[in-house]
């Protein structure tokens, strides 16, 4: 059932977690160092588990393998796609996020210009390639053609559908490295069963920044609305503030695959456990 390196933990007798180290400090978390964890020799019956084992290219296949062994991942393959891939979540959030189009095959510059004009933000349907500015913020047709040549060979991007998005004027935090997307006033938020369980600055490695109480109400209110509309168990919503002060959705992701960014992993999992404790408490 388990692949090499994977571990199935029952955390605080409340939460099943399938873990595997990825070697990335922003993602990995040693549950058994901070919480009481058991590794039952035999499952008590079918269990629902959160996967924290990195991103699987074969999520649907892995879901079916584990389900056959009595472990049902918290997201079905359909929920995983809804949380992860822009063509799936975008139709539910068109009023909350920049205008976007996507293509099954790499498009030509003329098509993109006709649909969106210049400049545009370009990415794979799931992610960028290491936040490279030259492959993401495209000013005109020649740069776009060069980017598509690189996309065809890039290990992260070549298998993803191309997404082109309206480039919105975001509030800047810092410019960063020469070929890195400039840091905007952007935050990663985590939602477990519709409840906020963690948030922090998306650009956690650069100059520190945070929100005022008023900004928190607006940004987290937006994240809560996204969680309501998508209605999946474990959702990550990245939100950012435009220069005008308006908050918009930048990305959605499956919480099983997402790095913690500037949020506290211990606090996040403690909050998840609290939600589960409340949810399963006997009614009086």
Image (tube, rainbow, N blue to C red):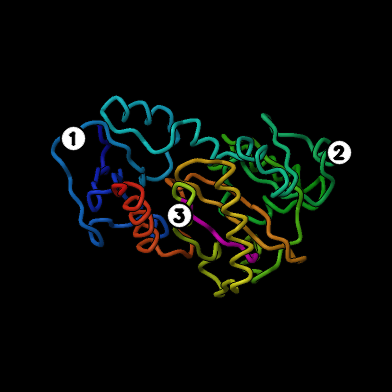
Question: Label 2 belongs to which residue?
Answer: 114
Question: Label 3 belongs to which residue?
Answer: 259
Choose between 228 and 163: the one closer to the eye.
228
Choose between 118 and 266: the one closer to the eye.
266
- Mark 2 vs 1, N-terminal side: 1
The residue that appears at 78% across and 35% down in the rendered structure is 108
Helix, strand or loop status at disc 1: loop
Q: Position of residue 222 (x, y in %)?
A: 62, 55
Mark 2 and mark 3: Cα distance apart in space: 36 Å
- Which residue sits furthest front? 284
In the image, the segment drawn in magenta is 183-191
- Mark 2 vs 3, N-terminal side: 2
Q: Is residue 189 magenta?
A: yes
* 22 sits to left or right of 162: left
Q: Position of residue 198 (x, y in %)?
A: 46, 60
* 5 sits to left or right of 250: left
Q: Quadrant of residue 114?
A: top right
Looking at the picture, does residue 35 appear above or below residue 50? Answer: below
């Amino acid at each position: 059932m388990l692949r090499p390196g994977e571990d199935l933990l029952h955390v605080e007798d409340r939460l099943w977690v399938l873990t595997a180290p990825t070697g990335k400090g922003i993602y990995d978390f040693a549950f058994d160092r901070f919480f009481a964890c058991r590794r039952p020799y035999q499952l008590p019956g079918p269990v629902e588990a959160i996967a924290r084992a990195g991103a699987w290219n074969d999520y649907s296949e892995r879901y079916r393998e584990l389900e056959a062994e009595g472990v049902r991942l918290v997201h079905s393959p359909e929920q995983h796609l809804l949380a992860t891939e822009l063509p799936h979540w975008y139709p539910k959030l068109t009023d909350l996020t920049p205008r976007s189009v996507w293509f099954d095959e790499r498009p030509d510059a003329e098509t993109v210009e006709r649909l969106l004009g210049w400049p545009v933000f370009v990415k794979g349907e799931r992610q960028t390639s290491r936040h490279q500015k030259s492959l993401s913020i495209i000013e005109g047709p020649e740069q776009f053609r060069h980017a598509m040549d690189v996309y065809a060979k890039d290990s992260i991007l070549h298998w993803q559908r191309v997404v082109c998005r309206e480039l919105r004027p975001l509030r800047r935090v810092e410019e960063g490295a020469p070929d890195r997307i400039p840091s905007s006033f952007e935050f990663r938020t985590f939602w477990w069963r519709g409840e906020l369980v963690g948030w922090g600055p998306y650009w956690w490695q650069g100059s520190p920044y945070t929100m005022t109480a008023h900004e928190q109400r607006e940004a987290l209110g937006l994240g809560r609305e996204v969680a309501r509309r998508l209605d999946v168990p474990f959702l990550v919503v990245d939100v950012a503030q435009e220069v005008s002060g308006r908050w918009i959705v930048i990305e959605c992701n499956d919480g099983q695959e997402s790095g913690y960014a500037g949020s506290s992993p211990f606090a996040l999992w403690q909050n998840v456990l609290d939600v589960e404790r409340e949810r399963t408490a006997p009614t009086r």
